[in-house]
Image (cartoon, rainbow, N blue to C red):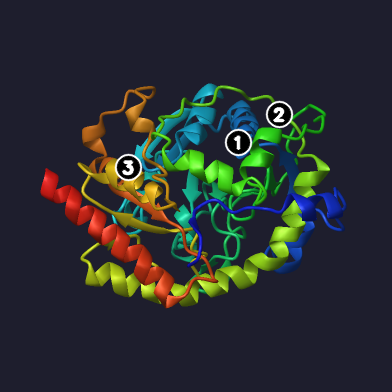
């Protein structure tokens, strides 16, 4: 039976053998495979939220401060804009795509200076259907390396600014790459980040058994919004790990798309709602929606069987009360945040693996519903 975990892992033995050696920087790897516009200027940061904080500050200094976000989004991204002094607007999302409907986005485009587009969980946003000529577009590709809009054009080629994560789709310590069509006056020299030993141990295969035994019985946590904007350059280990992971990622994405047919069949058979899959999706995970009354207990029970899923983004910005938001205005985002379970999907899974996964989910949901 395969391992069911949304966390990708690395071998410390292979890391020690390879060390911090790498041949190409992440932007060079992306330019070779994905990015067609060679005029993008690369900027590296330790985390995407920190990269965005400095970008938002720069745009605000230029008079561009009104930003539209989807209401279903990581709260740390929005908090970066808030701390940078921007005016924040939200639009509710569709419950099938988890993103802003195009007609809603077009209406907002006349009211804001910047649109923040997320290819949520690797589902490419329909960029080719929209006119972005009079507005700044920030394209968040943290989940969507090798995703294709219309199954033709790689994500990351549409925004005025494009954000890639160096650790979301490949096992790594941290790291973010911001690509900009114009020079950014960040006005600081970044020191290299130190190695996060806690993170390194957490994602290592050598400590996997011990960590998983701990995770089996760990309660769900509500993380605090991160208020640290100390910018650093990723260390060479991060670049080395990304290079190693990137080599395998394209084939992994293709393999996930093939295995996804079993997820779709079983989700339909068991009457589960889920995020739609389009040709060109990178399938960061497979997201299902369950009764909010039992969602957290389903997650915890799955852990007992060493099936490790997550509930990204259960902590949407509207729940923090920072932006004078009324949850009633964003019913779809609120529903998603309370019902989502993100399942792992891997190219090496078999039909039998997926059947086992869904049978466990179905049995747990059935038992829990009988207790309500």
Kindly indicate whether the residue at mark 2 contacts the one at mark 1 (C-beta within 8 angstroms). no
Q: Residues within 10 Å of mark 3 (few under 14, many from 20)?
A: many
Distance of label 1 from label 3 (alpha carbons): 23 Å
Whole-percent x, y for residue 276 in the image: 35, 65
Q: Which mark is residue 267?
A: none
Q: Residues within 10 Å of mark 2 (few under 14, many from 20)?
A: many
In the picture shown, does residue 254 fall above or below 162? Answer: below
In the picture shown, does residue 76 fall above or below 322? Answer: below
Q: Nearer the viewer, mark 3 or mark 2?
A: 3
Whole-percent x, y for residue 121 in the image: 46, 55
- Residue drawn at 37 percent across, 24 percent down: 323
Judge from the rendering whether residue 363 lies leftward or rightward of residue 24; answer left or right: left
Judge from the rendering whether residue 319 lies leftward or rightward of residue 77; answer left or right: left
- Residue drawn at 71 percent across, 37 percent down: 45
Q: Mark 2 points at which residue?
A: 231
- Residue drawn at 44 percent across, 63 percent down: 126
Whole-percent x, y for residue 10 in the image: 68, 53
Distance of label 3 from label 2 (alpha carbons): 29 Å
Describe the element under mark 1 as helix, strand or loop. Answer: helix
Whole-percent x, y for residue 309 in the image: 42, 50
Label whose residue precedes the other's in the sequence (1 or 2): 1
Q: Mark 3 points at which residue?
A: 337
Kindly indicate whether the residue at mark 3 contacts the one at mark 1 (C-beta within 8 angstroms). no
- Residue drawn at 25 percent across, 62 percent down: 272
Describe the element under mark 3 as helix, strand or loop. Answer: helix
Q: Name the residue under label 1.
A: 52
Kindly indicate whether the residue at mark 2 contacts the one at mark 3 (C-beta within 8 angstroms). no
């Amino acid at each position: 039976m395969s391992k069911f975990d949304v966390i990708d892992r690395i071998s410390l033995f292979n890391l020690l053998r390879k060390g911090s050696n790498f041949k190409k920087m992440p932007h060079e790897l992306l330019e070779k495979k994905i990015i067609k516009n060679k005029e993008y200027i690369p900027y590296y940061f330790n985390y995407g939220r920190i990269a965005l904080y400095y970008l938002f500050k720069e745009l605000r200094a230029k008079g561009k401060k009104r930003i539209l976000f989807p209401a279903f989004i990581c709260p740390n991204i929005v908090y970066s804009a808030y701390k940078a002094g921007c005016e924040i607007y939200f639009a509710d999302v569709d419950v099938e795509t988890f993103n802003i409907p195009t007609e809603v986005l077009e209406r907002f485009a006349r009211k804001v200076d910047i649109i923040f587009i997320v290819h949520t969980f690797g589902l490419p946003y329909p960029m080719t259907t929209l006119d972005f000529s009079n507005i700044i577009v920030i394209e968040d590709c943290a989940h969507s390396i090798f995703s294709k809009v219309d199954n033709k054009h790689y994500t990351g080629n549409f925004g005025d600014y494009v954000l890639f994560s160096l650790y979301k789709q490949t096992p790594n310590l941290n790291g973010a790459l911001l690509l900009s069509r114009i020079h950014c006056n960040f006005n600081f020299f970044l020191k290299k980040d130190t190695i996060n030993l806690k993170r390194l141990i957490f994602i290592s295969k050598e400590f996997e058994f011990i960590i998983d035994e701990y995770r089996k019985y760990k309660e769900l946590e509500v993380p605090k919004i991160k208020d640290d904007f100390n910018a650093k350059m990723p260390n060479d280990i991060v670049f080395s790990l990304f290079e190693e992971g990137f080599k395998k990622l394209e084939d992994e994405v293709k393999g996930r798309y093939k295995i996804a047919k079993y997820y779709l069949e079983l989700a339909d058979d068991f009457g589960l709602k889920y995020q739609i899959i389009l040709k060109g999706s990178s399938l960061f995970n497979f997201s299902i929606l369950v009764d909010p009354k039992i969602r957290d207990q389903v997650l915890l029970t799955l852990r007992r069987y060493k099936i490790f899923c997550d509930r990204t983004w259960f902590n949407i910005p509207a729940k923090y009360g920072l932006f004078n938001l009324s949850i009633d205005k964003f019913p779809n985002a609120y529903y998603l945040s309370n019902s989502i379970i993100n399942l792992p999907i891997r190219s090496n899974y078999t039909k039998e693996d997926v059947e086992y996964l869904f049978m466990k989910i179905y049995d747990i949901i059935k038992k829990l519903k009988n207790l309500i």
